[in-house]
Image (spheres, grey):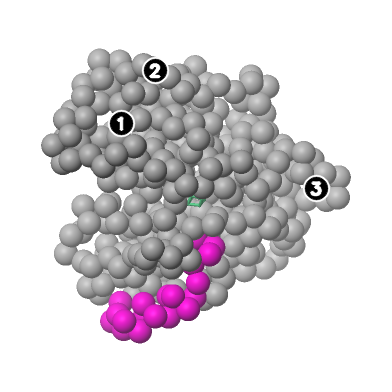
Amino acid sequence: MTKLVLTQEKELSQEEIKELQEEVRKLAKKKNAVILAHYYQRPEVQDIADFVGDSLELARKASKTDADIIVFCGVRFMCETAKIVNPTKKVLHPNPESGCPMADMITADQVRKLREKHPDAEFVAYINTTADVKAEVDICVTSANAPKIIKKLNAKKIVFLPDQALGNWVAKQVPDKEFVIWKGFCPPHFEFTYKELLKLKKQYPDAKVAVHPECHPKVIELADFVGSTSQIIKYATSVDVNRVIIITEVGLKHTLQKINPNKEYIFPQSMNYCRTVYCCTMKGITLPKVYETLKNETNEVILPEDIIERAKRPIQRMLDLS
Ligand code: SF4
C-alpha cells in the first residue's frame, strides 16, 4: 500500500534550490532526458520540468517524446502510463514510494471478478489506476475527458472505477447509461468537507468557486465550475472576478500565479487534514530526489511486457477518442 506521509529530507535554502535546479537541467541536457511534472508537484520541481501538465497532457507528451530518458515527477501510476505509451524509453521515478492511494483501492483480480458479474458492461478506468488494472479494462479516461468519451461508447452499461466521486459526476452527465461505480476515492479531495467550503464562501463572498470532480458530491454542488486541473486553470485565470476559491491540490497555485498573477487564488490550507487538499505522495518527489535519480539513473520503471501490451490498448483508445 502507498505510504501516506512522506517528508522532504531537509528544507533547502533558496540558493541551494537554485544550484540544484541548475545541476538537474545540465544533467537533463547531457543525458537527453525530458522532465515531466504534474501540476500537484512542489513549485521547485515544477520549475525544472520541460513540461508541466495534468494526467492527459503528460500521457500525450510521454507518448511523443524522442528523449532517451523520461524523468516523471508524479505518482507511480503516471510513470507506469509513460512506460506503457513509450516502452522503449527509460522511465525514471524520483520516489518509487510515491503511489496514489486511490489507485491502490482496486486490484486486477477485483476487476476480473466484476467482469463475471457484469459481462455486458464496458469497463472504464480512470487513469489513476495501476498498470495491472489498466490491462483488464476496455478504455481509460481522465477527469478532463471522461464525460466526452463515455458518451461515445456503445455499451448501455458502464462499470466505472475506481473513483466514486468522478463516477457519480460523470453519470449525471450521461443519464442514458447505467453506471456501476467502484467505491474508491482520493483522500485529499474527497475528505475535504462542504462545511469548510461554506466557510470560505462566507469569508470571500465575491469569489467564484472551482472544484475538481474528485471532490465529494456535496462540495461539487456548491461549485460555480467543475473540471480537471487544466480546465480549472483556464476557468480560474480568465473568469471575470478577482478572486477564485479553488478546491483541488494546492500545487496548482504555482501555475495559476504564473499564468495570471493579477488574480487571487484561494486554496484551503490548514494543519487539519480534512480542511485542506494536500497530496502527501505527490509531495514525496523532492528536488534532491530528482537530482539523484537522474544522476545515477536509478528507480527505473519496469513492467512485464504482457502488461504493457494489454494496458496500452485502453490508453491508446482514450488518446484516439479525446
Ligand atoms: S491527489 Fe488524489 S488521486 Fe491524485 S495522486 Fe494524490 S491521492 Fe491520488
Q: Amino acid at mark 2?
A: Glu
Residue 250 among magenta residues: no
Mark number, residue 4: none
User: At 49% across and 31% down in the image, what residue appears?
Assistant: 96
Q: Which comes before the other along the chain, label 3 or label 2?
A: 3
Residue annotated with mark 2:
297
Q: Which comes before the other along the chain, label 2 or label 1?
A: 1
Q: Secondary structure at mark 2?
A: loop
In the image, residue 51 lies at what x, y percent? Answer: 31, 37
User: At 53% across and 64% down in the image, what residue appears?
Assistant: 191
User: At 25% across and 20% down in the image, what residue appears?
Assistant: 27
Q: How many angstroms separate mark 3 from mark 2 (CA)? A: 39 Å
Q: Is residue 224 above or below residue 103?
A: below
Q: Which comes before the other along the chain, label 3 or label 1?
A: 3
Using the image as rendered, state which of residue 75 and residue 286 is in the foreground.
Answer: 286
In the image, residue 46 lies at what x, y percent? Answer: 29, 41
**Is residue 158 found left or right of 90 in the rendered image?**
right
Residue 206 among magenta residues: yes
Residue annotated with mark 1:
288
Q: Which residues are magenta?
A: 189-207
Question: Decide: marks 3, 2 in contact (CB < 8 A)?
Answer: no
Residue annotated with mark 3:
114
- Asked where in the image residue 74 lies, by quadrant, the reply is top left
**Is residue 265 found left or right of 100 in the rendered image?**
left
Which of discs 3 and 2 lies nearer the camera? The answer is 2
Which of discs 3 and 1 lies nearer the camera? The answer is 1
